[in-house]
Amino acid sequence: MASQKREYTRAKIAKAAKVNLETVRFYEKIGLLPNPPRAANGYRTYSSEHLKRLNFIRRGRELGFSNAEIGNLLKMMDGNYACDQVKNIALVNVSVIANKIADLTRMKLTLEAIAAECRGGQTPECAIIDKLLES
Amino acid sequence: MASQKREYTRAKIAKAAKVNLETVRFYEKIGLLPNPPRAANGYRTYSSEHLKRLNFIRRGRELGFSNAEIGNLLKMMDGNYACDQVKNIALVNVSVIANKIADLTRMKLTLEAIAAECRGGQTPECAIIDKLLES
DNA sequence: CCTTGAGTCTGTATATACTACAGACTTTAT
DNA sequence: ATAAAGTCTGTAGTATATACAGACTCAAGG
């Protein structure tokens, strides 16, 4: 018995999946989360299937997948997928992340170097401004 | 003689400052770049002052400053500024960047670990999907 | 039963930082 | 003279949400 057949309101499922209340509706709008059935009053009624999917999305986001990539992973999950394809998407992401880290590291070093030259204080001369103005 | 009193069209200044043509107009719209005088035909005529500013903006962006922060730096440059304030902005940025690097590093390690467990191949079971579905 | 507060509904606006396009006009080159 | 290239404006789209207004419904207390 993996998950019980529970029902959730939007606020409840948002809390359970640790995403923002409005984000749930947003994911429905962009097709990541299937539209839940509505009660007689028009209120959405989510199931544990929705919760599982929302958790999947959140974890994917935490690992740096774009919503489009998560959509692909979900589509694969729903249809037939080969492990190869999934692994490929993951590895592409690893290299994208590696590039971002390299960029940020370069930025940080430069910024630290510039800031270190700055004497601070109340003087109107500033090494940082000078550096940014350099031709 | 730092910079000659040259004039530039939008395409020319964009190229000279290494920013996208449309981005120039965008920076005017959000107030980072002062509106240039217009020729009789309505065309913008930029000066070397504009080029200096555009270069400043680009370099700032490359160092991870937001447009709002660059706006502050430019305002300081135009008025009276104290080196202290500038340095502060720079150092706040260093720590923001450091946090981003830490986040990305964590993401990358997790993703690599998950991908390493994946046998690949054409099987429909996938350690990556399983990991994302984990409760 | 009535009121009040909380929850939900929809559509739309905001934020960041651009990029792209349509339709009209001007300038430049052949 | 004509065609290509550049410029103008306003607006829409990208990605990823978040927030709000105004209407409606529901649950609890007196």
Image (cartoon, coloured by chain):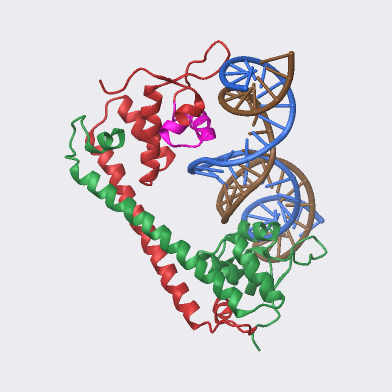
Chain colours: A green, B red, C blue, D brown
Q: Please determine whether, in this image, residue A76 is positioned above or below residue A116.
A: below
The residue at 72%/66% (across/down) is A34
The residue sitting at 50% across, 64% down in the picture is A64
Q: Count of labels shown?
A: 0
Name which quarter of the figure residue A129 lies in. Answer: top left
Q: Residue at point 25% right, 41% down?
A: B87
Where in the figure is residue D26, as x and y percent of width and height?
75, 63
| Quarter-of-image position of residue B48 | top left
Span shown in magenta? B15-33
Left or right: where does residue B96 sit relative to residue A115? right
Q: Which is nearer the eye, B95 or B60?
A: B60
Rendering coords of residue A12 (x, y %): 63, 67
> Where is A62 relative to B84, above or below?
below
B21 part of magenta stretch: yes
Q: Position of residue A57 (x, y in %)?
A: 59, 67
**Quick one: quadrant of the C terminus of chain B?**
bottom right
Is residue B45 visible to the viewer in this orientation of the structure?
A: yes
* Nearer the observer, B92 or B51: B51
> Seen in the image, is D1 located left or right of residue C30?
right
Q: Please give left or right for residue C9 compared with residue B6 in the image.
A: right
Residue at the extreme top = B40
Left or right: A131 with respect to B116?
A: left
Above or below residue A123? Residue D22 is: below
| Residue A33 coordinates in the image, percent (x, y) | 68, 65
The residue at the point 41 percent across, 31 percent down is: B54
